[in-house]
Image (spheres, rainbow, N blue to C red):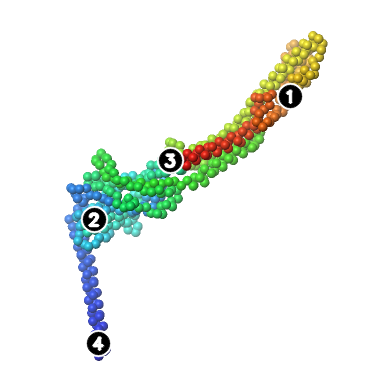
């Protein structure tokens, strides 16, 4: 009896479970059938060529962006690449339904419904993502609200002012508007959120060359020949990271300028060493400048980094100019002055000799040795002149012999070492004030160039970084 009762209970349980499964399957089938009927009803008689509220108020498109990545900020082409989710919401009264929840539809329904012809006004190229399927989403709420979402990659133009490069700040815009509907038919507005309609991925704070300072939005109307058009604008602010340029441009240039000052410690007669060091420094700065400008747009103004490179070039070029001046002092200026001094000494010696001869002929006395020494000249050099030692020669050979003696005395005096007695103020002795000591020029250059380079750096960094 107990066994019969247990079997009866199991039979009833199985029967109830079967009835429940049958009812659930019937409800699911009815739900799918109802959904199919609802979708067929929505698109029946629906003309996607006509915008919502055709002939009435303009349709309002609410737009929002979720920025995934920003990369390829190109200063040469002046554009940037943006990857984001584009959300568009609008109300279409023709799509109202009595379903109690929002209908999540595939992208195949988009071909049967009206979708705004939104485009990016400053875009150079744009594309939808299609892996593994077209990345689009469409949902319809019971009141006819349509939510359209798509993943888009846009390369947009971004005019840049590079006068402060690499310490510049740039603002890149993304302009959104309708291509075929003017403001009387369609108007755009941003989503009413705390981020003003543009949400940015937090990972964008770690971009390699830039820091994202923020995003701002605005809505306005643009005037074309065919009428007024509603437009949305999103602006992204960037600050360039200058660490790369400090390491690869500024530091090497400063070191090259400092190394060029080694030329001031090399003796002036080491011409090959000083010229090789100066030319190498100039060529190195020129190479850095050319390599930098190769990766930059051909702008008509001078950038901040160009000012530094030009200043460094002038400093290393100034080292060559300083050595050129030293060579001119040694080989031209001082030699000319020595020649003039020798000619003056010869002339004074001749006049003194003639005066002594006349005086000796009159009173038979000989010029005293103290008189000779009072002028500080080496008269023994000139006593070998044929013009003074041989009075009995013929007049025809007198000028020739005198000229030979003069050249002989000049060569002997030029062979005497010309010294520059040094004083704490680096001045030549009073006997030859016009002579310039080349070592003194290098001493001044060793002090002048570092001071001017320090002042140049202080002025540069205060102007372009601090102020």
Residue 154, percent from left and from top: 35, 49
Mark 1 Cα-neighbour bin, 10 Å: few <14, some 14–19, many ≥20: few
Furthest residue to the right?
A: 364
Mark in the foreground, 2 or 1: 2
Mark in the foreground, 3 or 1: 3
- SS of the residue at dot 4? helix
Measure the C-alpha gap from mark 3 to mark 2.
46 Å
Dot 2 and dot 1 residues touching (CB under 8 Å):
no
Instruction: Locate residue 79 relative to residue 350 in the image: left or right.
Output: left
Mark 2 Cα-neighbour bin, 10 Å: few <14, some 14–19, many ≥20: some
Dot label at residue 162: 3
Mark 3 Cα-neighbour bin, 10 Å: few <14, some 14–19, many ≥20: many
Disc 2 target residue: 145
Which residue is more in the foreground, 166 or 411? 166
- Which quadrant would the N terminus be assigned to in this image? bottom left
Which residue is more in the foreground, 385 or 236? 236
Earlier-in-chain disc, 4 versus 1: 4
Disc 4 target residue: 5
- SS of the residue at dot 2? strand
Residue 144 higher or lower than 426, as above or below: below
């Amino acid at each position: 009896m107990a066994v019969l009762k247990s079997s009866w209970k199991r039979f009833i349980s199985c029967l109830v479970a079967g009835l429940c499964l049958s009812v659930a399957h019937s409800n699911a089938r009815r739900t799918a059938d109802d959904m199919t009927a609802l979708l067929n009803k929505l698109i029946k008689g629906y003309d996607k060529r006509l915008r919502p509220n055709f002939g009435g108020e303009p349709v309002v498109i609410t737009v929002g962006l979720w920025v995934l990545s920003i990369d390829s900020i190109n200063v040469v082409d002046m554009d940037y690449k943006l990857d984001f989710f584009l959300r568009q919401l609008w109300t279409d009264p023709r799509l109202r339904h009595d379903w109690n929840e929002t209908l999540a539809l595939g992208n195949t329904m988009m071909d049967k419904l009206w979708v705004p012809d939104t485009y990016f006004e400053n875009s150079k190229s744009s594309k939808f993502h299609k892996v593994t399927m077209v990345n689009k989403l469409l949902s319809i709420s019971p009141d006819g609200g349509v939510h359209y979402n798509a993943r888009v990659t846009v390369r947009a133009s971004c005019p840049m002012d590079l006068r402060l490069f690499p310490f510049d700040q740039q603002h890149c815009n993304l302009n959104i508007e309708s291509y075929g509907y003017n403001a009387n038919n369609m108007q755009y507005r941003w989503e009413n959120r705390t981020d003003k309609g543009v949400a940015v991925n937090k990972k964008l704070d770690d971009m390699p060359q830039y820091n994202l300072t923020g995003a701002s939005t605005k809505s306005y109307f643009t005037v074309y020949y065919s009428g007024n058009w509603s437009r949305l604008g999103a602006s992204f602010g960037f600050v360039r990271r200058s660490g790369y340029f400090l390491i690869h441009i500024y530091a090497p240039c400063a070191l090259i300028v400092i190394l060029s000052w080694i030329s001031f410690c090399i003796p002036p007669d080491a011409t090959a060493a000083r010229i090789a060091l100066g030319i190498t420094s100039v060529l190195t700065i020129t190479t850095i400048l050319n390599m930098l400008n190769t990766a930059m747009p051909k702008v008509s103004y001078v950038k901040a980094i160009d000012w530094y490179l030009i200043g460094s070039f002038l400093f290393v070029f100034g080292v060559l100019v300083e050595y050129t001046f030293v060579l001119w002092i040694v080989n031209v200026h001082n030699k000319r002055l020595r020649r003039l001094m020798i000619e003056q000494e010869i002339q004074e010696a001749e006049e003194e000799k003639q005066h002594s001869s006349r005086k000796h002929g009159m009173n038979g006395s000989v010029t005293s040795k103290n008189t000779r020494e009072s002028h500080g000249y080496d008269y023994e050099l000139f006593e070998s002149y044929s013009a003074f030692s041989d009075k009995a020669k013929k007049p025809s050979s007198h000028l020739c012999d005198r000229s030979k003696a003069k050249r002989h005395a000049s060569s002997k005096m030029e062979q005497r070492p010309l010294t520059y007695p040094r004083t704490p103020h680096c001045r030549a002795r009073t006997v030859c004030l016009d002579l310039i000591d080349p070592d003194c020029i290098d001493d001044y250059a060793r002090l002048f160039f570092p001071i001017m380079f320090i002042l140049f750096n202080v002025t540069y960094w205060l102007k372009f970084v601090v102020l």
